[in-house]
Structure formats: structure tokens, C-alpha cells
Amino acid sequence: MTDAAEPERARRPEPERTLQAVPSAELFQLLVATVVDYAIVLLDPEGRVASWNQGAERLKGYRSDEIIGRHFSVFYDEEGRRTGRPEQLLDMARTDGRVEDETWRVRKDGSRFWADVVITALRDGDGSIRGFAKVTRDLTDRKQYEDSLRANEARARETADQLRRLDQMKNEFVAMVAHDLSSPLTVVAGFAELLLDQWDVFPDDDKRDMLGRIQRTAVDLATLVSDILAVGRIEAGELEVDRSPFDLVALVQRAAVDAAPPTSPDRIRVDIPAGIPHALGDERRTWQVLMNLVSNGLKFSATDSPVDLSVDRQGDELVVRVRDRGTGVAPEDRSRVFERFVRLSRPEGSIQRGSGLGLYISKALVEAQAGKIWIDNGPEEGAVFCFSLPVASGEVG
């Protein structure tokens, strides 16, 4: 039994003896050639490709006969070649012995992958550079995962910031409600109670006066509620605009008529040259901005002073200006005039109050239409509120 098994064992090569029989240089070349998960490339001292394994062909798309002899800068994008990044890496490897770099690389078909590259200088016995060993790993999946994590973190920070802003806005709103809503409601309730209790006592003129005050207060309250809802939409990113060409001149002229006080129909003056083209924007939103700025101009001016409206073209934009003859805007108020809940000083003796939201809302509405809004001092007195909108396509000179 022992003698019969001996020839069988003799025919089976032992693994250790087989590996020992292969020269180490040949074995190493076999290892390099068959690795497919890493691109292992030998570069000559000038950076030209001298050898190319299966992993390099799989990762970068070139066959050996297409790439050997070409400079390894072919794996870099235009920006990398322009800045001399391949040469910089070879210089660093010469100086330090090795260099590692992570960046985008380019395949034969032009697609990019995120690569971890290690370049090692190869020296002979006297220290002379014989070439470079370049090992490349494809880390695109890891890169995309890390980018996704960073994007999620950024979104989380943005959400947290938005929640903080909304919380601050809520606190500001609560404080404003306590001050701005309670007083008008008290006025309405007081007049209503007085009229109910003494309807038969008051003359008709007094009744009409009290009912008028109730009506004006109710309008102010409705405006305040509308402003608060608009701010909520702006802060939540839900402000919608419908941009299309519209006649800005006609809109300004209509605003001048509608906003003029019944007792002073000529108080708002309009100056618009001929040939003004259509604007590109949301007509309804622009109307809100116009009425806000014009009503501010009326409130911040003496009752006998005019408010001027003008439209002119400046390049590819149309600029609307609303000028009042009030006290102007103090320098310390200019940087915050378009912020939430900011109230500027009113003319002496004025009893009208605003929500402190109108200019903030106007700024959001104008910028949502690709326009700008700003404030200038008047040439003599008062302030000039300005906003711009793009000229409609096809009407650009």
C-alpha cells in the first residue's frame, strides 16, 4: 500500500517548491501584472509611462500599446496640466522619496474619477533616479459618500439656522403683537362699546367719526396680518413670482391714481419719458412694491408736499424712483432700512404707524424678480426709494 502511493505523491508538486522555483523578479512582475484593483505604473525619470498593468488598463481605459511612452500628465485635467501639477508631484517625489495626492483624474473616455495616487522615487545604488513607481486607487465611491455627508451636514446647519431665525422671528412677532395689535383692538372695542351703549345720545357726525376710526383701524390691522403672512412665506422660501413682460409705465400711472389721497388727488406727480419698454417681472408683486413705497412717501411727508414718481431706462434695466419731501433717512438707519420690524422716525405730529415689514417685504419681492432696491437722499430734502427690474427680452437696446 505504501509503495503504490509513492509515485502519486511524486507527481504532485509542492507549493513551496513551486514558488521557490520562480525567480523573485519574475514573480514580482507576475504579481504586478495580474493586480486589477490598483493601477501600478512605472514611469521613466521624465514621467513617461514605461509599464502598464491590468489594473491601470481597467481603471484608466488605455491599452498598453496606447499609453506606453506617453507622459503621465495625460491623466490630469486641463487645469492640472496648466498649473504643472504632474511635474510638481515628480519634483516632490525626487526630494522626499515619495508623495501622495488625492484629486480628480481623467480616463481615456474623458470621464473623471477621484484618485489616491502614491508616487515613489526609484533610485539605483548610487542614488540616481531610475524612474518612479506610481500606484493609483479609485476612491470615487468614498469621495461621493464623504461629499454626501458634507452636503447633509451643510443642509442640517442651514435648517438649524433657519429654525433659529424662525424662532427669533416668532419672538419678535409675539412682542409686536403685544404692542401693535392690542392697542388698535382696544380702540375698536372702545368705540364699539361706546356706540352700543350711547347710540341714541351721540349726534350723527360723531357716530360717523367713530365708525370711520373703527374702519381705518380694521384696515390697518388687516394690512399688518397680511404683512406677517407675507414674511412667513418669505422666511419659509415659499415666495412665488410669475415673471413675464408687462407695462411698467401703465402700472406706475395707475398706482399714482389709486394711492393719491381723496382730498389731494394731485399730490402724487408722475414724470416718465416716452419710449420706455416693457419690464420683465411679476406685475402683481411689482404693484405691491409700488403701493408700499408710495404710501411710505405719503406718510413720511407733510400733508401738503408732493410725492414724485419716475421711470427711466438704464441699460438693460428699468429704474423706478419714489421721492418724498420728508425728513429723509438718517445715516445710521440706511444699513438697516430693509430689515424686518425696523421703523424709521416719523414726521413730528404723525400718528400713523407701520408694521416695520413693508420695506423688508418690498426688498424680497424685487430681488425675487431679479431686480435691486436701494435708497438715495433727495437732491434737496426727503428720500428717494429706488428699485430696478430687467427690460423684457426682445426689447433690450
Image (tube, rainbow, N blue to C red):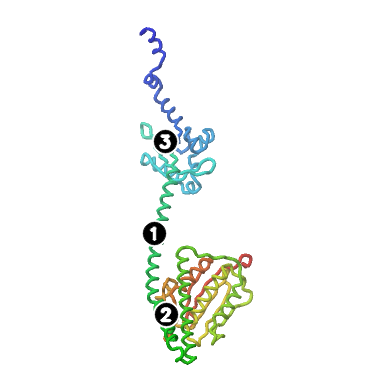
Q: Residue at x 55, y 71 (%)?
A: 286
Mark 1 to mark 2: distance in Å? 35 Å
- Out of 131 and 15, give the one closest to the viewer: 15
Residue 1 position in % (x across, y down): 37, 7
| Label 1 sits on residue | 160
Rendered location of residue 215, percent (x, y):
48, 81
Q: Residues within 10 Å of mark 3 (few under 14, many from 20)?
A: some
**Numbered disc in front, either 1 or 2:** 2
Numbered disc 3: secondary structure: strand
Cα distance, mark 1 to mark 3? 48 Å
Query: 10 Å neighbourhood of mark 2: few (<14), some, or many (≥20)?
Result: some
| Residue drawn where x is 46% and y is 82% of the image | 214
Q: Residue 133 has which mark?
A: 3
Q: Is residue 36 above or below residue 292?
A: above
Please name the amino acid that badge 1 sits on.
Ala
C-alpha span from label 3 to label 2:
82 Å
* Type of amino acid at the residue the image marks with label 3: Ala
What residue appears at the point 56 percent right and 82 percent down from the top-left corner?
Answer: 269
Asked if the residue under mark 3 is in contact with the one under mark 1, i.e. CB atoms within 8 Å, the reply is no
Q: Secondary structure at mark 2?
A: helix
